[in-house]
Image (tube, rainbow, N blue to C red):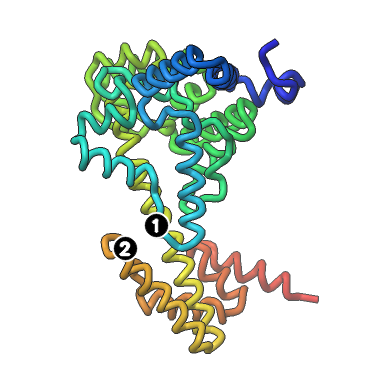
Amino acid sequence: MSRPNLARSTVGRLLFTFKQYSLTYLELLNRMFRAGPGGKRAALTMLAVLILASGEEGLPFAQDLDDLIDTAGQMMGFNTNMKRNKRDWAYSMLGKTFGDLALYGVSAQLPLDFSGRLGLGNLIPGTGALRPSNSDSMKSRESTEVLGPIFSLVGQASDAVGAMDEGNAGKAALNLAPTAVRNAAAGIEIMTKGHNTDTRGRKVMDLPKSAGVTKMLGFNPTGNAEKSRATGPLMQDAALLRKRQGQITGKLTQAVVDNDQKALDAALAERDKWNERYPDTPIVIRPSAVKSRAKQAQTDKDLRVLKSVPKTMRAQAVNSMAGADEP
């Protein structure tokens, strides 16, 4: 068998279900490099074909390295975003067309995107799990990488519940369907409506009807892939900015509560340092927000709970809290 020993156990089979292609590719590449001059030429040819098919993003461990750099940089207080930086550099040096070709391979210029299917950039699961800028969707993706198909089924169930909460029973049922069924339904939707939707039935973008055929075949339309590539780095920047803003607001609030001028000055200096380094994404904190949070922090829990419930429930909340206070 070509599987490693770990992948032969019951748990290992589940975790390595979608890793067989990448593991076999790397093993073959390693053996060719060690097989002398002829083998090295063959290995370089393999890498050239891989770059042609999936670009720089598809090179072995490329996305894993991006995750590690982003995680380390963000933990040290920097706004690191390798996907954004690489796109900016490629577009400035090569232009959009050749920049996309260099980053994502030939499928960036074709109606269907297959770079994600053939690329080996994401080989190590969970490399971005500790990245401060992770949104809820990114955390879910990292969990899926680590736990494999098991968690993927949980994610499908979660998507189904979300769609049902919004009253979209049809989308909820599709979210639980096998991949082939979901692809067929998504393709028909594109051909009939002229656009695709997300797991909750919300419109994503307009697409030509020919993209429906691409989706039915199990491939991602290039237009949709490009939309994800463009918005992904932007969402990461926004998530990191919200996190940093929340952290500094929390430090300012605690400094006000503790009447600690030194801590207050340190938090303001941290904000100013960020704004000086990244003027295009400044941290803006309203004094009224800090004052309000400090006031809440010094308020009894009962009063905070009372203010948080809808007005129509406040009488009920008062009675409940009164009952809890009785000996």
Residue 219 visible, this angle: yes
In the displayed orientation, state which residue is furthest to the front. Answer: 37
- The answer for how far apart the CA atoms under marks 2 and 1 are is 8 Å
Q: Residue at x 39, y 57 (%)?
A: 79
Q: Is residue 319 left or right of residue 52?
A: right
Residue type, numbered disc 2 = Tyr
Q: Is residue 248 above or below residue 240?
A: below
Q: Position of residue 23 (x, y in %)?
A: 59, 21
Q: Residue at x 58, y 39 (%)?
A: 126
Which residue is more in the foreground, 150 or 315? Answer: 150
In the picture, the disc for residue 47 is none
Which residue is more in the foreground, 283 or 45? Answer: 45
In the picture, the disc for residue 79 is 1
Q: Position of residue 131 (x, y in %)?
A: 51, 50
Q: Which residue is mark 2?
A: 278
* Mark 2 surroundings within 10 Å by alpha-carbon count, few (fewer than 14), some (14 through 19), many (20 or more): few
Q: Is residue 115 left or right of residue 135?
A: left
Say which label, 2 or 1, has the lower sequence index: 1
Residue type, numbered disc 1 = Asn
Which quadrant holds residue 212?
Answer: top left
In the displayed orientation, state which residue is furthest to the right. Answer: 327
Q: Position of residue 276 (x, y in %)?
A: 31, 70
